[in-house]
Amino acid sequence: MRNLYMTLLVCFATLAMSACSRSEPTPSPGNTVKPAEPPTANVDVRMSNAFVEGTVKSSFGEPLEGVNITSGEATTTSDVNGNFSFSRVADASGRFVLNFSKTGYFNVTRSGVIDDNVTINVVMQSKGGANTASVQFNAFESEIIETRGMQVNIPAKSLVTLDGREYSGTVQADMFYLSPDNADFTELMPGSDLAAVREDESEVTLISYGMVEVSLTDDGGNTLQLKEGERSEMTFPIPETMRDNPPPTIPLWYFDDESGLWVEEGIATLQGDVYVGEVGHFSWHNLDVPAERVSISGKVTDSRNRPVSRVTVTVEQTSAVTNANGEYSVYVPENTPVTVVVESEDYFNYSPVASVDVAGYPGGSVVRDVDLQLPSVPVISGRITDTSGNAILASIYCEYEANGITHTSDVAYSSSLTGEYALRLPLDISGSATFYIEPLGSDPITRVVELTGEDQTLNIEFDGTLSPIDGSVIQIKGPNGNTLFAATINPETAYAVIAEEAFSYLASFADSPESMFTVGVEMYDDSINSYNTASVALLCMLNGVYHVFAAENSHVEITSVDNESISFVVIANGVYYTDTDTAEVEATLSATITSPLNKMNMDMLTNVTDWSSLKCAELIPELLTPIDLVAYISYMGIDVEALYYHATEAEADEVCSRLSSAGWSPIDEQRTEAGYTIAYMDSGFAMVMVQYEPDGIEAPDANRYTLCVIPVTFL
């Protein structure tokens, strides 16, 4: 639920984001048939502060760049090394949920219990790769897709588009069968811990006999689904390692992308050496035996008692990645002996492999202190600074050669406050290695270092050959590192505010006073000061060219703040285009900013009956009166009126209808079960945000209202 301050931030970001949107074609009319809707887990989904980071790779172990990753309202993309991070995630009743998608790959959703710091490793399977099938067929005909003994039968004339139109054209079908015998099973499967919900809503942990994803699209790449009432028969082979005493029936489950849980849906029966069952929709489906869960946790250290972070701990069919303190936690089925292990390939191919056997425990048991000790490996650490010793925020990784093959290390980031970083490298690696260091706003540099196989200190000092961003300049660079945009902030318009839990910044450019550059951090926490879910937007008319940049997920690090000023760093990967070149390009915006810190002024009136007394009366048509609360806000250099009502949904819809009748056009609309938020724009540069939430909207008088209307004039 957004409070007043976050709704204002959304106002600023929405304008630029809507400018980046491209309209979709309207579906042609046809017979409307409701798509199949599976059962859902009964969970409360909201956004929460939680640091989740990790790496995305292909099934060949190569880093995947440009993977689209979403978590509720937060989005990001993986970098060139497959790395990503979030500081605010979708919280489904205590579980984080992240969705991964990339053209040419099967989608993956990862989820797990929210902790202080969570690291996950994700493997994405390419379409057309091993254990997959890809076919095309006519929707009027039936089709059987098969790979590795896994079969899915698609009935004739059974498919519809997501908006309910019967489909009769060519179908692109892609299927991925994932056996528990697959070496990458724990990193390829949805979720992470095989947590599930039964039909009676009880929580269990699963023992998988195999899972499959089916993806169907039309000739335009749009998703197709079974129509309501249709059934698809699925035939699962029995994995080689599970052929002894297979049970006569096993429940079927599908993965709920919203809750991050497996949900029970049907049953499969043993027929010879296969299991056969039916499903009512296409997604990830799993053949699993349910059991009550047992919790196992511990810590991984090296022989010097240093915590080992970002290493995968595998426990049979589930796994976890250690956090910054070397800690892990997993769920396993009841009464099932397991082995806790860090596989050799997950820690520089070390030997002998460290493992601990854990006996079976009754459901509900908690087993702690299952610790592992690994060999010590070399750690390269130091500081990254300028010639004056000032800390520089930069990424650093290295390439080294082993057995004639070039390897790339994980990426580390230096602190903008201290400049410190640390990289872990394999055992027995010596010889020449190339380190790549990329500071904020500058081109990368390299350093060649002779590795000794021991801990080493490597301090990086920039000698002035680079040109770091000036504190008053915003830069945007394209995919090839070419500068697309650069402008200087007008200090007289810079406006930074910390209000409630939100931090926001607004400024215009010296050469373009009718411009806008905004940064919005949704949850400000002065104990963290580093965020990866900030929105960044830029609108600017410069030298006769209209520039647009927008990013919903960015890195913002606040380097200093007091009662009078704030300094922060911005790195945003987003979309950029101009009115002279409508093609969108992926670009990176970067800046270091120091700005006065402003305060928010607010006055409030209740039970306002005279519409003409409002400042916005000349801007928007008369809506509803009386108004339960009017909040007058001076915020980021803009005066805003926020109108709050205890309104019904019909009254909220009436507000939208009056705006539309007066010529205001909806440019951004978000609807959920919790209500809706719609941004309207007129023919000029004005916007109205309408927010309706039947469960309540937080208002500045600490009361809750169901309807909020905020008119904002930008320029």
Image (tube, rainbow, N blue to C red):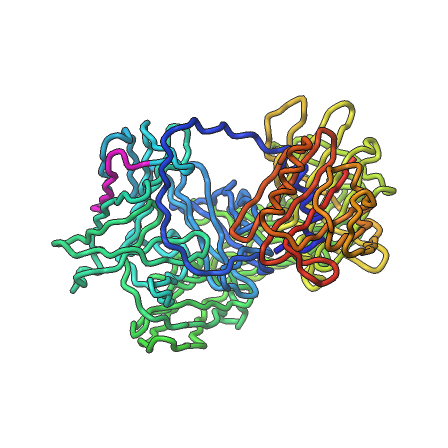
Above/below status of 295 relative to 699: below
Residue furthest to the right in view is 492
Residue 384 at x, y = what percent?
Answer: 69, 53
Above/below status of 197 relative to 544: below
> Where on the picture, by quarter, is residue 273?
bottom left
Horizontal relation, residue 676 to residue 137: left or right: right
The residue under the point 59% across, 26% down is: 583
The residue under the point 33% across, 45% down is: 282
Q: Specify whether residue 465 is in view.
A: no
Residue furthest to the left in view is 272
Above/below status of 432 relative to 376: above
Q: Specify whether residue 425 is in view.
A: yes
Seen from the viewer's position, the closer of residues 88 and 698 is: 698
Seen from the viewer's position, the closer of residues 513 and 51 is: 513
For the C terminus, the image quarter is top right
Report if residue 157 lies within the magenta region: yes
Residue 37 at x, y = what percent?
Answer: 37, 48
Horizontal relation, residue 636 to residue 405: left or right: right
> Where on the picture, by quarter, is residue 423?
bottom right
> Where on the picture, by quarter, is residue 175?
top left
Horizontal relation, residue 273 to residue 497: left or right: left
Above/below status of 405 relative to 424: above
Residue 420 at x, y = what percent?
Answer: 67, 58
Seen from the viewer's position, the closer of residues 707 and 255 is: 707
Counting labels gives: 0
For the N terminus, the image quarter is bottom right
Where are the magenta residues, as a range? 149-159
The residue under the point 37% across, 57% down is: 186
Report if residue 126 lies within the magenta region: no
Residue 278 at x, y = what percent?
Answer: 24, 49
Seen from the viewer's position, the closer of residues 356 and 471 is: 471
